[in-house]
């Protein structure tokens, strides 16, 4: 089923170094998402390791980074609160199975149905979400009681963030031998360590961030994830509890993963495999459920860090996952000392590179409906979630398309040598144009013999077929002969026209019909 391509040694160094950069950025996010899901930090870190490793090896998009994500965490948080963490593991296990089924039934191809304005809105909305998420690093405390930094604390934080961003901006202009973000993290970490050692000022580190979330945690050190079958009753009642959460988490995870895959495709000018990505995500989450992890999906922020740092192959994702678990097992002291300002600066650079600034410049050049969809999807992504935003964008795009296409059906009428009136129909006949189609004809004034030529028109749905049936009945009630010529074979079979006065001629040029296949999925 899977063909794992050989790694290209020529890009091995870039993949390895960019993977280490991503590993550093994964740690605080995995911990933060774990707290969002109301589970321990190790549960989130294990998810980042398992999902990242499995999808890097088996997934359909080399260079894309997956791990524990906020989208999945938010969906499963209430399940943990209501039933406990063991039900979370069971739900993640079922989530993986559902995603595997999506891959087996080749549902990944449907990401092609997402219009480009929806993609732009998705990208811009996620950039804004990433930016807003980083603002919490400029606060003291968490939740409603948190207060904004002020005085020397704020200025030091801003200075270190600015230094990180400056290194990320300038270094690529001098050399691309090493990822700029990795150099920035190391330099700012050394600066923070010096300030902390001298006692001049204490810079907030990853460990300080973790203790702010849970003062009882003293270290991030842990072992490798161990096999853990969810301790829940395997009954129909348990299935009723976890299935809604699993279905929603699986849907959100696949939507975010497939959209991130499409975005990386555009940036790298290569093509990933959507169906294979579904299988990879499913296998990863299934293992998460069996190894005590919270599950996850693709991460657009980390994927952008990886791509911008030069990571293009599977080795980058594998390095990120292995580096993360290495930090947990043997390098916890190092990762705990990384200042959050350095990671915040890297994420701000991700925001700048992720946001589609061109979408602002083209707003007055594109159709107003497309501009509205970009803004709508961006706004819903920020205030609600990705799945709702994409669904809303697709629905609005479909309605706009239906409205435009529905108004473009027209006829050209003429009288042939036999005295029959011939209507040459142009445009698609479907639910959006069915009413206009009916209003184009006037059976009462037409002659006794009428021909409707569908050569330049196609019937796309049941509404179109019913419109033809209704029109045919209007002619037969008046005792007039109606000929329908060049209809598609499918439409001809579905027509239910009473009487022998209606003649149906099937369109025989089957080569003009194109059927979507899974060949590219």
Image: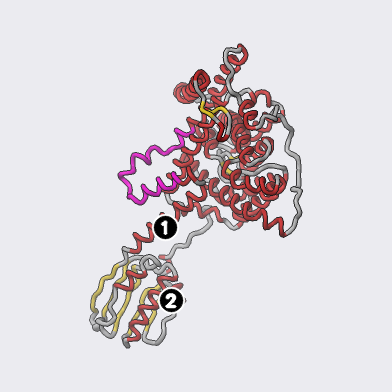
**For discs 2 and 1, the disc positioned in front in the rendered view:** 1
Q: Is residue 368 above or below residue 440?
A: above
CA–CA distance between discs 2 and 1?
26 Å
Disc 2 marks which residue? 492
Give, as a single range, the part of the protein colored magenta: 350-379
Residue at 48% x, 44% y is 383
Residue under numbered circle 1: 398
**Residue 7 magenta-highlighted:** no
Q: Residue 344: where, in percent of width, then height?
A: 53, 28
In the image, is residue 180 above or below residue 427?
Answer: above
Q: Is residue 369 visible?
A: yes
Identified at 62% across, 13% down, the residue is: 197
Q: Does 454 sit above or below residue 47?
A: below
Work out whether residue 175 can be spotted.
no
Q: Residue at x 40, y 58 (%)?
A: 399
Q: Residues within 10 Å of mark 2 (few under 14, many from 20)?
A: some
């Amino acid at each position: 089923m899977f063909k794992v391509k050989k790694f290209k040694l020529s890009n091995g160094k870039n993949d390895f170094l960019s993977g280490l950069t991503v590993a550093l950025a994964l740690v605080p996010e995995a911990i933060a998402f774990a707290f969002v899901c109301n589970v321990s930090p190790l549960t989130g870190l294990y998810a980042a390791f398992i999902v990242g490793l499995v999808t890097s090896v088996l997934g359909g998009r080399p260079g894309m980074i997956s791990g524990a994500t906020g989208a999945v965490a938010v969906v499963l948080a209430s399940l943990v609160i209501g039933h406990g963490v063991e039900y979370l593991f069971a739900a993640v296990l079922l989530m993986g199975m559902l995603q595997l089924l999506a891959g087996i039934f080749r549902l990944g191809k449907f990401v092609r149905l997402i219009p480009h304005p929806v993609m732009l809105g998705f990208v811009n909305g996620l950039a804004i979400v990433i930016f807003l998420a980083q603002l919490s690093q400029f606060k003291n405390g968490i939740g409603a009681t948190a207060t904004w930094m002020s005085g020397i604390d704020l200025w030091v934080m801003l200075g270190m963030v600015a230094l990180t961003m400056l290194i990320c901006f300038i270094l690529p202009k001098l050399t691309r031998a090493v990822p700029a973000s990795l150099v920035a993290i190391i330099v700012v970490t050394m600066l923070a360590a010096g300030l902390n050692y001298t006692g001049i000022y204490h810079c907030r580190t990853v460990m300080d961030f973790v203790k702010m979330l849970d003062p009882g945690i003293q270290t991030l050190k842990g072992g490798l994830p161990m096999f853990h079958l969810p301790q829940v009753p395997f009954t129909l009642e348990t299935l009723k509890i976890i299935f809604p959460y699993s279905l929603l988490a699986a849907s959100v995870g696949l939507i975010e993963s497939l959209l991130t895959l499409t975005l990386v495709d555009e940036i790298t000018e290569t093509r990933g495999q959507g169906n294979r990505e579904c299988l990879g995500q499913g296998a990863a989450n299934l293992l998460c459920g069996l190894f005590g992890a919270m599950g996850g999906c693709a991460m657009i922020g980390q994927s952008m860090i990886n791509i911008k740092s030069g990571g293009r192959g599977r080795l980058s994702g594998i390095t990120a996952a292995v580096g993360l678990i290495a930090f947990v097992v043997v390098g916890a002291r190092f990762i705990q000392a990384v200042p959050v300002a350095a990671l915040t600066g890297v994420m701000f650079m991700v925001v700048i590179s992720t946001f589609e600034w061109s979408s602002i410049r083209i707003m007055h050049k594109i159709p107003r409906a497309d501009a509205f969809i970009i803004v709508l999807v961006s706004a819903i992504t920020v205030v609600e979630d990705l799945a709702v935003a994409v669904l809303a964008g697709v629905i609005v795009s479909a309605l706009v398309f239906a409205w435009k296409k529905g108004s473009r059906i027209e006829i050209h009428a003429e009288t042939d040598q036999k005295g029959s009136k011939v209507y040459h129909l142009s445009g698609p006949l479907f639910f959006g144009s069915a009413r206009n189609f009916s209003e184009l004809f006037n059976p009462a004034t037409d002659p006794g013999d009428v021909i409707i030529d569908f050569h330049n028109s196609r019937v796309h749905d049941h509404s179109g077929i019913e419109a033809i049936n209704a029109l045919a009945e209007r002619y037969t009630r008046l005792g007039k002969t109606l000929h329908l010529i060049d209809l598609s074979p499918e439409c001809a079979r579905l027509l239910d026209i009473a009487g022998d006065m209606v003649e149906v001629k099937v369109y025989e040029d089957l080569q003009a019909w194109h059927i979507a296949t899974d060949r590219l999925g």
